[in-house]
Image (cartoon, rainbow, N blue to C red):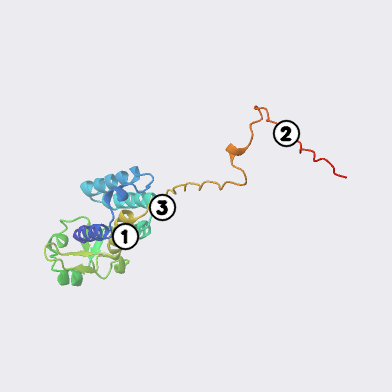
Amino acid sequence: MALLLLALLVALAIGWACRGSLDRLGSLPLRSRRLVLLAFAAQLVGTVVGGPVHPLGLVVSAALAVAFLARNRAVRGIGLVALGLLANALVVVANGAMPVSRSAAELAGVPLSSIAVGADPRHEVAGAGTRLPWLADVVPVALPVRPEVVSPGDVLVVAGAAQLVVVGMTRQPTGRQRRALPPRPASGRSATSRPSPLLPRTAAPARAPRPSVPHRS
């Protein structure tokens, strides 16, 4: 999706402008990363096989993606991505494919010839019988190179992915460094001034007797 690619490039530029780094983004504590690979595999199988397998593959893919996002809900941006995927899954299940608005396609400059003849099994032209039409592809994106029509769910996914990149690049380490304890102030005598218990104590020198003065009568 061209809109997603453009948003990720802008997010990377913002992250670098805020002195972020890709190392911080790569070290995000994400759980169950294999669910993402399984979600892509399910969607790929549904796309290749087509027919009734296509919406089934999308449902399985969305369920796996939502499970992955639920386990990582503490990461910023994950909630928007999960909500967008859920919205896309609902409209596809309700219609068997993603409906595309004619008026939005005309505004974006996207031809619907391949969808109208059934050459694209993932999309269909929206009509009077379309269910959940507000979740369909109704947002025109008139990009100069690759125009397209996206759904509100796609917009949520793009916004969440961009937020995830910016926050991941600019986040601060969570580990706390221990501060060095200041040296204790010396109280009273120093350790070196105390007499050692192993050494005998030296007696104080005896005072010399005063000379006697003769008494005069």
Q: CA distance from mark 3 to mark 2?
A: 88 Å
Q: Answer few, some or many: residues within 10 Å of disc 3's Cα (few below 14, many 20 plus, some between 14 and 19).
A: some
Give percent across and percent down for residue 18: 28, 60
Q: Amino acid at mark 1?
A: Gln
Find the residue positioned furthest to the right. 217
Give percent across and percent down for residue 29: 38, 47
Q: Answer few, some or many: residues within 10 Å of disc 1's Cα (few below 14, many 20 plus, some between 14 and 19).
A: many
Q: CA distance from mark 1 to mark 2?
A: 87 Å
Q: Secondary structure at mark 1?
A: helix
Determine which residue is flagged by label 3. Answer: 70
Q: Amino acid at mark 2?
A: Ala
Q: Is residue 105 above or below residue 123?
A: below
Q: Which circle's residue, 3 or 2, is located before the other in the chain?
A: 3
Disc assigned to residue 206: 2
Image marks 1 and 3: residues in contact by CB distance under 8 Å: no
Q: CA distance from mark 1 to mark 3?
A: 17 Å
Q: Amino acid at mark 3?
A: Ala
Residue 52 visible in the displayed image: no
Q: Which sits in the foreground, 87 or 118?
A: 87
Left or right of 28: which side holds 116? left
Determine which residue is flagged by label 1. Answer: 163
